[in-house]
Image (cartoon, rainbow, N blue to C red):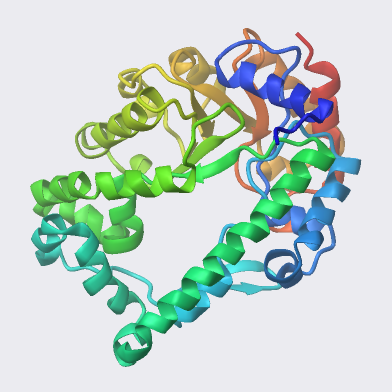
Amino acid sequence: MENQNPVYLEKLDRLNKTIEKGTADRVPVLPIMETWAAFYGGANLEDAYVKNPNTLFNAYKKINETIYLDGILENGNLIPLKMMSNFGEGIYTLTDKGFVTKGSEGATMDPSEYPELVKNPLAFFANVIAPRKYPILKEDPEKNLDRLRKAFGDFMEFLQFNGQVDSRIENELGLPVLAKGVGFLTPDMILDFLRDFVGVSLDLRRHPEEFLAACDAIFEPALEMTLGSYPVADKRGVVFSPLHLPTFLKPKDFEKFYFPFMYKFVEEVAVKRGYRIFFFMENDWTPYLSILQGLPDADIIGLFEGGDLKHIKASIGNKFCIWGGMPLSLLRLGTEQECIDKAKECLDLYAPGGNYVFSTDMNLLSLEDAKPENLKAVCQYVHENGKY
């Protein structure tokens, strides 16, 4: 049943008009906050993310009662902890500070193995990388089938947990939850899961053709993962895609090793299938703006951590819906008035002509990342003063 909550429909319409590079009735307000939300709500993290969906919902209920929002990107419960616990080390774990990684750091693939990866990506990940990253799979192989069955059940429980929370946030609080699926660009997958930063940096010089062939070989399996996470495109959500590698590349290397796969991702996901894409664009993308003009026309969101956002909007606002502008550093350390002054500057510089969502420039994780009174003040200011 479609959500008929009038508050939800109003806020979703505001976001949709802006995502489509238009002008809504006012500037949407959507700070990016993951575990900050649970901390602000006073929730025990294990209860909020593993044991009781009501705990996580109640944290957002408290936020909704005190801080103006036009929606959230996602509810912060991103790691299927129970599922991952079936595989021992090399996993995320949950502490009172939030999610942290444990074990199996660094490269998990040698560059000599690129041909094997290219020949059969799925077999390579299953038979080589998984046992290497999770040694328990080779230490006790007779139990692997039972372990995988248990992991699948735990993952389905994780999806049901999040689905229950998201449904209540949307239906009861009237807040759109935008991230319905996730998509990884293949150069980032090689960086994050196989070769690490040092390895990729060396490969672009020593094994450039093998790197490109691998990115191409794993594109279809990665696309299937994206579509599986969000089977039907609609106007209620976005495909979330964090971009990690680009800003460590020279523009000419970005154009050769990354942009072709970014282009193909946009073409396959947004142009051909009608999804909206949310690119979390880490660091400063200013050196790549002219290259980004070559992207296909589609509903693409860019949250920009660095750079002159006014210049970015002027340069690629025809390609991207622009998000960001509110510095995490100021929310953490500034006074309430300093934060309001910055919010006013965001409206003055970025809001004219529409196509702008007021957001934080980075993700809020710990409660120390933003003073609650500062976040409350800027969200309320933009909501009241961001009318068109």
Q: Closer to the camera, 301 or 153?
A: 153
At 69% across and 40% down in the image, what residue appears?
A: 72
Residue 108 coordinates in the image, percent (x, y): 27, 70
Up the image or down, 238 lies above or below 39; here it is above
Up the image or down, 45 lies above or below 61; here it is below
- What number of labels is visible? 0
In the figure, is residue 189 to the left or right of 2? Answer: left
At 18% across and 48% down in the image, what residue appears?
A: 217
Up the image or down, 66 lies above or below 291; here it is below
Residue 37 coordinates in the image, percent (x, y): 75, 53
At 82% across and 24% down in the image, what residue appears?
A: 383
Classify residue 376 by image quadrant: top right
Q: Is residue 325 visible?
A: yes
Residue 224 coordinates in the image, percent (x, y): 34, 46
Up the image or down, 238 lies above or below 99; here it is above
Classify residue 157 by image quadrant: bottom right
In the figure, is residue 270 to the left or right of 157? Answer: left
Q: Closer to the camera, 148 or 106?
A: 148
Residue 302 coordinates in the image, percent (x, y): 50, 30
Q: Closer to the camera, 45 or 140?
A: 140
Quarter holding the N terminus? Answer: top right
Quarter holding the C terminus? Answer: top right
In the figure, is residue 95 to the left or right of 266? Answer: right
In the figure, is residue 72 to the left or right of 254? Answer: right
Residue found farthest to the front: 1
At 74% across and 64% down in the image, what residue appears?
A: 48
Q: Is residue 365 visible?
A: no
